[in-house]
Image (cartoon, grey):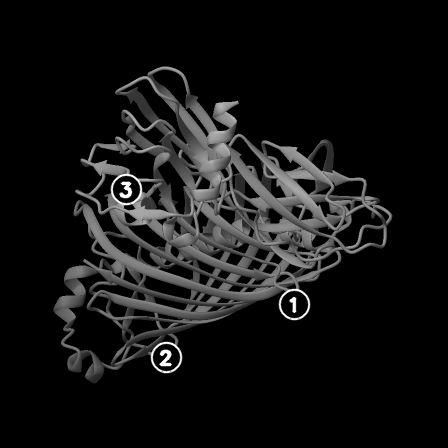
Amino acid sequence: MLKKITAVIFMLFSLLICTNAFSATTNFTGEFTNANWTIAGAIFGCGASTVVDNSTTITLATANNCALTSANYTHTNGGGGVSRAGTASFSYSVTQSANHTYEALYGIVGNLTSITNSAPASGTASQTVLVGEQIYFRVWKSASVGVSTLTISGFSYSYAPAAPTGVSGALGDTQSVVSWTAPTDAGDGAITSYTVTASPGGATCSTASTSCTVSGLTNGTSYTFTVEATNAHGTSPASTASAAISPNTTPAIPNPTQDPTVTGQLAAQVTNVDNFVHAQTTNLSSHLNRLHSNFTDQGSYNNISLSTPSEIQQLMGITNEFVGAWFAPSSYMVASNSSDLPIPKVKESKGSHGMSGIWLEGTLSYGAIDAGVTSNKFTSSGLTAGMDYLLQDDLIVGVAVGFGWDSTKVDTLGTKTTSISPSLSFYGSYSPMENIFIDGWVGYGSTLLSNKRWQSTDSVLVAGDRRANSFYGSLSMSGDFVVSATSFEPYVRGDFLYSRLNSYSETGNTTFLLTYNTMSFNSVSISTGLMVSHDIQTSMGTFTPRVKGEYMSSSNSGGTQNMYYTNVVSTVYSLGLGGIPTRVTSGQIAILYRNKLGVNGEVGFEFSNGNSSYISRSFNAQFTVLF
């Protein structure tokens, strides 16, 4: 009874507060520094209670020789309480100097927990604190004799997570699948659960992942959703509310194989890889073809005697002795524009083996391809740099590095695929007999495909990166038959491509995100064609206009893409590879240049048409410095 009466009297007089100054800075950190605590003693009758801070402990002591006194230590934080939920932990010790009625308490303002009210005590405790609440320590006594003390040490505060972000809800029948992004600040411990709350109505769902389904909603009612994250130390503030949605009859999950953005983007990925390999094939094939003109070391075009009038030969410093020293009589043929000057076909220089040239070649292409229900428009470029090496008199080998870039636009809403592709190739050209050449190369390339796709159900762009690793190669046979200064070069070439596209998952603010499994595809093609060129000799060097026609037929195998909605793993959809041309007819016009100093170059324009509404236009340029 005495205790209850004392408590009532204390409440009546607790508004009489006397503040005490800090004696030192506490070891508290962050928002729990010295300045954010209020120290006070409630006084009745005589003497002030005290609070002593010695940096590592806080000691609260009631006044001696004074009835009904208390000492209080409150984390007011400027009146706002804690800024973020969490758990306060500490050690305590309670003593009394005489036998009297007293009590030590801790907790939050309005909800205190008693440590002891009958005997000295010590131990540890923790207190869960919500945003805005004030942590509170108190010791009081009612007798006029003796002192009661409460000592707090080892204070620490462990934070709950920050609020999740990016909350969105997807329409459903009396329900909504809500998704969000985990907070970047998980607080002082791993997040153990999330709780989603719908407004109005307060329907909830809980999960350890970053999406869950809120059920029990009313169709036609507009709802927003907030999400809270919880760890071992508390619960975060609620997230910013999602955009409002109104549940309705569940829309059918769309079949991605019927989605033009999916089919178009898959075709774009394969096209990007194919364009990259085609650019390297074009560059390597063009370079090896130029080696046929004078199959020898020292770079093919060094020291070529031009079929010009004698005064131009003299202007260029080419003497008959120079010509005779380099060309055997068997290598001469009669020029159409000169009755008395020989034109060398092959330079007879045996035994001088070694590096013979460094070259650089580039291709820029643009065009379109029918990907079923979309018309993909692409821009592609490929750069190749290499070094030739005369291994023996009838065999030139070399190594080349390549780099490709491609951008394929699928629709006007932002669906597109861009890629970058470094590569390494080894090549060779072998002449088993005069005017006959066997060329070949093998290579490896790695393509990074960056994809964006318009998801029409939720009207958002989703994204994902994919890696493709490709092996490619070619083997061709050609002839070089010259009539006067005109060269006819028929050829047949076989190409192969094997590519493996790694799995990847889309990301974005929708529940209709797709995960694509690993996919591989093969392509084997046969091409046949004819190149016709004519040498025009000038004082500056040889200019050679050239036209080329080619027909390619290929067969593709593999290329089945399996996919599923990321949040519905049980249903797998399969999409066959389509929209890749298998029959292509090409034409090219080009101009080549070479001089006796070992410098040569080429620029050309190629146009191609094929099935699947394939259209391509390409610019090609090459520059070689020979040694």
Q: Position of residue 176 (x, y in %)?
A: 75, 45
User: Could you tell me the amino acid type at mark 1?
Assistant: Thr
Q: CA distance from mark 1 to mark 3?
A: 54 Å
Q: Residues within 10 Å of mark 2 (few under 14, many from 20)?
A: some
User: In which quadrant is the C terminus drawn?
Assistant: bottom left
Out of 164 and 37, give the one closest to the viewer: 37
**Badge number at residue 325:** none
First-in-chain label (1 vs 3): 3
Q: Which residue is mark 3?
A: 29
> The residue under label 3 is which amino acid type?
Thr
Residue at the image position 22 percent from the left and 53 percent from the top: 356
Disc 3 versus disc 2: nearer the observer: 3
How many residues crowd around disc 3 within 10 Å: few (fewer than 14), some, or many (20 or more)?
few
In the picture, measured across the screen, residue 139 lies left or right of residue 520, that is left
User: In this orientation, which residue lies closer to the viewer: 24 or 438?
Assistant: 24
Residue that carries the numbered disc 2 in the rendered image: 337
Counting residues from the start of the chain, the first of labels 3 and 2 encountered is 3
Q: CA distance from mark 3 to mark 2?
A: 95 Å
**x and y percent of residue 79 in the render?**
42, 53
Badge 3 marks a residue whose secondary structure is loop
The nearer-to-camera label among 1 and 2 is 1
Task: Determine crowd level at label 1: few under 14, some 14-19, many 20+ residues with C-alpha closer than 10 A.
Answer: few
Q: What type is the residue that disc 2 sits on?
A: Asn
- Residue at 20 percent across and 78 percent down: it is 313
Q: In terms of secondary structure, where does tag 1 sit?
A: loop
Instruction: List the residue tagged with mark 1.
Output: 412
Residue 35 visible within the image = yes
235 or 282: nearer the viewer: 235
